[in-house]
Image (cartoon, grey):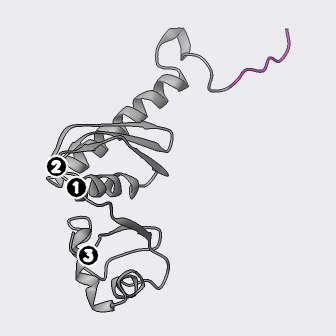
């Protein structure tokens, strides 16, 4: 009869046992979304009805945060996760507050340098450190590619 070619990952496994590649991808996305929800919950953020879905490298976040800072921290926890390239924030907040700016850390950055850039004073770095707790555990432990909240001073 000869040699036949097939698409390696298409269709179900032999005798219909197993899952299609699409089904496996859907389950993997649901598992990743569940892990993201658990990571946010473990940090103790006050988010009501938190739900996260993952579509490829996009995470979509739903729920109601108690304030803007919490909302932004949830976005950062999810966005600073390996495999997530973008976050669609569909959360709401109980209390309306000014939005913070975001800064992507580059090689050579320190919280002091970032504070000098945004606030004109390197000694304001504790403001940035506090705004990024509990994701940051020490002011010197930042890394290139990480995204940080830069809050409005006095907010």
Report the mark closest to the observer, 2 or 3: 3
Q: Position of residue 89 (x, y in %)?
A: 37, 45
Q: From the viewer's side, name the closer residue of 131 and 55.
A: 131
Please give the name of the residue rendered at 40% of the width and 29% of the height, measured from the top-left corner: 27
Q: How much space separates mark 3 and mark 1, taking CA atoms?
A: 16 Å
Rendered location of residue 28, percent (x, y):
42, 34
| Residue shown at the point (17%, 45%) measured from the top left | 94
Q: Residue tagged by mark 1?
A: 70
Q: Is residue 40 visible?
A: yes
Q: Residue at x 34, y 36 (%)?
A: 31
Q: Please, is residue 85 above or below residue 50 in the view?
A: below
Instruction: Considering the whole magenta stretch, tell me its main secondary structure.
Output: loop
**Residue under label 2:** 66
Residue at horizontal 39 percent and vertical 82 percent from the top:
114
Q: Is residue 87 magenta?
A: no
Question: Magenta residues, as a range?
Answer: 1-7
Label 3: which secondary element: loop
Tell me where residue 95 appears, x and y as whole percent: 18, 50
Q: Return the x and y of residue 44 as percentages of the image width and height.
A: 14, 53
């Amino acid at each position: 009869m000869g040699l036949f070619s097939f698409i390696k990952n298409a269709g179900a496994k032999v005798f219909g046992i197993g899952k299609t590649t699409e089904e496996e991808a859907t389950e993997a996305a649901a598992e990743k979304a569940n892990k993201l929800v658990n990571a946010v919950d473990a940090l103790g953020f006050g988010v009501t009805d938190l739900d996260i879905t993952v579509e490829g490298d996009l995470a979509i976040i739903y729920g109601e945060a108690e304030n803007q800072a919490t909302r932004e921290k949830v976005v950062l926890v999810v966005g600073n996760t390996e495999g997530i390239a973008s976050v669609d924030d569909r959360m709401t907040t109980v209390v309306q507050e000014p939005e913070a700016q975001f800064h992507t850390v580059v090689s050579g950055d320190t919280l002091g340098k970032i504070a000098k850039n945004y606030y004109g004073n390197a000694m304001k770095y504790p403001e940035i450190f506090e705004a990024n707790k509990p994701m940051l555990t020490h002011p010197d432990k930042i890394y290139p590619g990480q995204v940080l909240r830069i809050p409005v001073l006095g907010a």
